[in-house]
Amino acid sequence: MTYILGIETSCDETAAAVVVDGKTIASNVVASQIDLHAEFGGVFPELASRAHVEAISVVVAQAVRDAGIAYDKLDAIAVTRGPGLVGSLLVGLNFAKGLALAVDRPLLGINHLEGHVYSLWLTEQNRSIEFPALVLIVSGGHTELVLMTGHGEYKRLGGTLDDAAGEAFDKVGRLLGLPFPGGPNIERAAQMGNPATYKFPRAKLDETYDFSFSGLKTAVMRAATVPPSAEARRQRGGDKKAQLRTGVSVNDVAASFQAALVDALVEKTARAAKAHEVTEVMIAGGVSANQALRQAMRRETDLPVRYPPLNLCTDNGAMIAAAGYYRFQAGQRDDWELEVQPMWPLTRSTYAIES
């Protein structure tokens, strides 16, 4: 058996996990920072990196202990190298380097987006995923449509040109006065609203596979809020934020916004799946937890639609360990001069990974 320790600190979760043979989760520990960032309505990078420093040694030790193994039982240590927040990534990578040196184990730098992809392998232990597959990666900072033709072989078909889907959820949630994070709170509000109340735009972008949600966000703002008055803008200590229009239903706005965003994601994904003759569609990342997205995707395609359980949708160490397993099997070994890659697209690997 091959034991991989995965460490994830790309944003606002300090996470570590041990995965066996790329499929079986032996442990999975996550220290969330949601409460820390809630008052800002989004992730505050400096606070995030400090929180990682405070939590990482405890989280990693707990993951190894929960797995019921000693450090010398590990075969390799996989860590998120990017993309993500620079400070947060540095905490995880430097800790992983020190640990790998201390226990004399190989170090593997993993793409965070590839980690989200391999969260699907943790839910399909008894079934081989067939290629080519189409992967919609929808997280807080990324919206990518990727054709996967084999392990480690990716072709980016399209992605967001501005706000990612998760960012749009957070910004609209803040606009509507909902708690952070916006995604789950908008979904809850939408369940009590009418999605036909507002006809918000769906960006087509000349029939490409790219996405744009900034126009949708602006349309929601114009429909639902009153801009601050000139007097409010002049007052240094006054409330300069837009206020909800009188009579506006937060639930109806949330439902209409969610419907527009989901429509855009599903339409392009279903069209790409047909054009590239894939065997199945996979959804990964934090927004893949959205039930409206899951249901709409199943309605719009006859192909199998796969998505992780809720606890593997958001950032976690298990997905990094799972991706690390396939990298380890392919012979990847990174040296101690490995650096973080805050902007690191998921493209075709420079080597093939055997299944």
Image (spheres, rainbow, N blue to C red):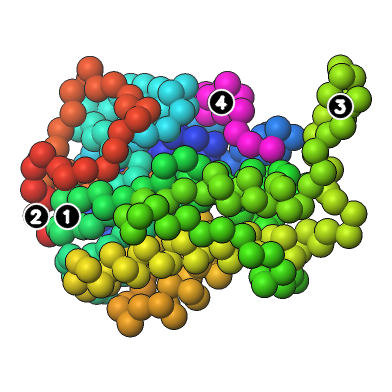
Report crowding for label 4: few under 14, some 14 to 19, many 20 or more residues within 10 A (C-alpha): some
Q: Which mark is residue 354?
A: 2
Q: Nearer the viewer, mark 2 or mark 1?
A: 1
Mark 2 and mark 3 lie on one chain; the one further toward the N terminus is 3
Residue drawn at the location 70% of the way across and 47% of the way down = 221
The amino acid type, in three-letter code, at marker 1 is His
Disc marking residue 204? none
Q: Which residue is mark 3?
A: 230
Which residue has dot 1 on it? 151
In percent of the image, x 87 and y 19: which residue is there? 234
Above-or-below relation of 178 to 335: below
Q: Amino acid at mark 4?
A: Pro
Give the structural element (helix, strand or loop) at label 4: helix
Give the magenta part as a residue range.
Answer: 41-53
Work out how far the residue at label 2 is from the one at label 1, CA to CA, in angstroms.
7 Å
Q: Choose the circle earlier in sequence order: 1 or 4.
A: 4
Q: Nearer the viewer, residue 51 or 211?
A: 211
Q: CA distance from mark 2 to mark 3?
A: 63 Å
Q: Amino acid at mark 2?
A: Glu
Q: Which mark is residue 45?
A: 4
